[in-house]
Image (tube, rainbow, N blue to C red):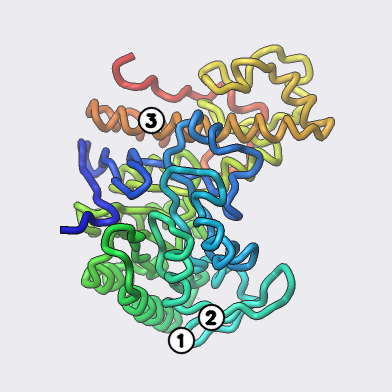
Amino acid sequence: MATPPSSFELVAQDGEARRGRLHLRHGTVQTPGFMPVGTYAAVKGLMEGELRELGADIVLSNTFHLICRPGADLIKRLGGLHRFMGWDGPILTDSGGFQVFSLAHRRKMDADGVTFRNPLNGDAIRMTPESTLQAQIDLGVDVAMVLDECPALPSTTSAMKKSLERTHAWAARAREVPRDPETGPAVFGIVQGGLDADLRGASIEALTALDFDGYAIGGLSVGEASEDMYRMVRFAAPRLPARKTRYLMGVGYPEDIIEAVAAGVDLFDCVLPTRNARNGNLFTSRGRLVIKHSAWHEDDGPVDEDCGCAACARYSRAYMRHLFLTGEMLGRRLYTIHNLFQYQRLMRRIRASIEAGTFAELLAWARTRDDRGRPPSAMRWPDAPPMPAPAGT
């Protein structure tokens, strides 16, 4: 009998929060887990060995952008995406559904698929549910996402229903694309429905009937209020199959991740840690810190005393600020290393707390934070409560 391309193993549970392992062809992903985003087959500024040292065991790339450049066919000829980018661990590729949302001015959509104008050269790119999944098969990734429509919020109920019908029809078509039963990839369906619980429930029913390898919650973190997002995640996650991976797309801030774990989500991705790093906004155990602020001009302490990353072990806030003000590329690399270390450390603490039955303490900490969703502050963070120590320390 062929070995399936993915399987989810539940290790421990604390309330709805789940500690598990997602077994894939190129390795095992510890969950809850965070995927650094390497849109163009690279996490900006870092080599694959550095990602491993930071604790990443899976990365995310984007099918749409790889089709635009250099092309899925070229990557296939060069041995697949793992060989192309020098990463031997699991890779998940987004399908391009978010680009259907974010590049509305560059696309034309119909029942069969969507046509984009390549943002690099203006050439027409046609994406259908079948071609999008086939491109991900050609890339040789571990997890492929179906093509979906991510509608804008707010939208009328009639517009949301029409969008949902298209997403479900495309999912059914993608499900029929032939795959090798052993090499896969695993295919995840994407639950849509905006902020309407009835539509989310209908989407879960339609997609679970197709028996995907895992399920994503999409269409959130697109401008809605945090509490609206939490309400939908709390509704959707527990209704997804217990023995399948649950993935919340494009989220988010550490507090948002903890709230979603509390609802039963297993997997996350977001550009926040790397994008904020490039702008000098650093995540710490006490909140977000703006490194260019004059408060750090003569500060000899590390960015975060409770951090074990290479940047905090070697360099002061004053030096990190100096790198930002002088535009040194070393600064951007160090900020990225720091932020991704913070995210991976957060996930390790979440997993440890679920195993120890103390996840409620971490959730309480997240709910006492006063910087949720706000612009980073240079001065507030030293007075904020530190992250709880991991269980057993």
Q: Few, some or many C-alpha atoms within 10 Å of disc 1 (few <14, some 14-19, many ≥20)?
A: some
Q: Of the numbered discs in the image, which one, if any, rests on residue 348?
A: 3
> Is residue 382 depicted above or below 40 in this figure?
above
Give the mark nearer the N terminus: 3 vs 2.
2
Q: Which amino acid does label 3 sit on?
A: Arg
> Is residue 125 depicted above or below 366 in this figure?
below
Give residue 202's position: percent from left, percent from top.
27, 73
Q: In this view of the protein, which residue sits in the foreground, 73 or 262?
A: 73
Give the mark nearer the N terminus: 1 vs 3.
1
Give residue 104's position: percent from left, percent from top.
61, 75
Farthest residue, direction right: 326
Instruction: Please give the count of numbered marks on the rendered protein.
Output: 3
Q: What element carries label 3?
A: helix
Give residue 149's position: percent from left, percent from top.
46, 73
Which residue is labeled 1 in the image? 112
Q: Is residue 365 left or right of residue 239?
A: right
